[in-house]
Amino acid sequence: MDIVVENLVKSYGLQRAVDHISFRVRTGEVLGFLGPNGAGKTTTMKAITTFLVPDSGNIHVGNYSIHEDPEKLKKNIGYLPENNPLYEDMPVIDYLKFVANLHGIPKQEINGSLLNVIDLCGLEAEKHKKISELSKGYKQRVGLAQALIHKPEVLILDEPTTGLDPNQIMEIRELIKKIGKEKTVILSSHILAEVEATCDRILIINKGKIVADGTTQDLRNQASGKNILKARILGGNLDSIFAALQKIDGVKVVDFINKDQNRFYLDGDQSKNLAEGVFNACVKNGWILTELIPVETKLEDIFKELTMESPVKN
Amino acid sequence: MKQIWIITKRELQAYFDSLMAYILLILFLGFSGFFTWIYGNDIFFIKQATLMPFFNIAYWTLFFFIPALTMRLLSEENRMGTIELLLTKPVSNWQVLMGKYVASLLLIAIALILTFSYPISVSTMGNLDGGEVFSGYLALLLFSSMMIGIGLFTSSIGNNQIVSYLLALFLGIFFQIIFGMLGQSLPGIPGHVLDYLSTSTHFESMTRGVLDTRDILFFAGISFLMLVFSESMLIRKRFA
């Protein structure tokens, strides 16, 4: 089921949390929602799950609109809200059974679904404990289990890995990837590495507006538009090496990183292969190329660039 | 209908798991039993085969107990954020409210059923009017329904249980005492309207064995109105 968000607007008082956001998530896609605190991630997710009614705009999940068929839409969504609220006074298994009943899972299938999610989320040893007795990581698993129990077509996860230890994070990421192959998944996170590891596509929003949309690779290209190399060349005069590097086709900027160690910094056109030029220059002049390192723009830098307080570059 | 029952079952389980239900049942039976049989204007004192003392004491006991029962219903969901979990499941606002309302009403019904030994004992001692007993119990149940409605509404307003409890008493006291007093001192139509809004008018006539649709409509109407108010609070949150 596709999720289509059209011109979503939501204000809290005078503050506009979400400002004319539109995007589409296709079946089999895992979309990562990135943005600083208060960017509007949670608000958008709450609007998709029908919990918040937007000021204007529409959201379709499959053929169901949040305005016209909220009940049918909700049947197809598995939702893990921010802060993972749970009925703390209930035992895990009773709670999951309650959720299964609300979703109208037929009686004969309930036990199967329960066993399935308990197994999937690793809750076997904890299933008879009261939720309030569980550690944060296990609570998070219960939150995931309740979102998955009815095998929803669409999964909305608001910071699914907070409070988990590194092993659990890996497990949950694997799980999300597996689910994401057939279902539509939206997840939000502060952790860039996580989004990079799990998501097919990234949406960065800032101050209620989408500032970037694409795969990690797209974003890298879009944000930097640069092709950066670090090189260390020995066996020649510093100035002549510098001059030779400047002559390479496509090079825009050459700089020293460290004069004493013969380290250079090259910045050039994306379409050109700078490494080849550097290599050829060395061969021609008999220099020794000891290091040649392509510098990738990190997702962190892109994120910072797009969401800094200064005017947003788009 | 099925969704309502699922929520009702969970709420009932929460009542019994948290011991709230047992405390309520014990206190209610103890309180009403003590004043019906042992102390004050009790049955032996008035020397008549009537349950009037019980109905009167239960009327006030329920007035104070029901808000304690309902104060948790929505304020706790608001505080913990579980309301979001619940409302993003395939249930409507009404089903959530009705589920909670029915759970509380069932618990009160259990408490009232446990007092059936009273009319049985009294009937062995004298000539008890069955109709009066029936309409008296019905009055208690209807009054409880109204108090549950008020409690549910005050619980939907914020996320603090104590505030919800006190607010329910505050609203309740208007129906219980203030409207009646004003109704008697004001002349003309305003006086009649206020008099109609006073619970004691309806309650007393019902416990005397008079079954009047106006009385039943009053309790049902206030209950319904309070549920409507609660729903508007739930909706308001989603537009916040």
Image (cartoon, coloured by chain):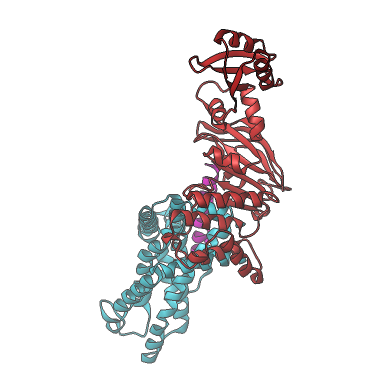
Chain colours: A red, B cyan
> The N terminus of chain B lies in which quarter of the figure?
bottom right
Q: Is residue B232 magenta?
A: yes
Q: Nearer the viewer, residue B17 or A287?
A: A287
Determine if residue A80 is in view: no
Q: Nearer the viewer, residue B176 or B214?
A: B176
Q: Is residue A72 above or below residue A275?
A: below
Place of residue B91 in the rendered image (x, y in percent of width and height, measured from the top left) = 60, 57
Q: Name the residue rendered at 57%, 47% in the picture.
A: A157
Read off the magenta span: B217-240
Residue A41 is drawn in which quadrant? top right
Q: Name the residue rendered at 36%, 71% in the picture.
A: B23
A20 with respect to B110 (left or right): right
Instruction: Report the magenta stretch's main SS.
Output: helix
Q: Is residue B48 above or below residue A75?
A: below
Place of residue A108 in the rendered image (x, y in percent of width and height, measured from the top left) = 66, 72
Q: Is residue B225 above or below residue B122?
A: above
B47 with respect to A173 (left or right): left
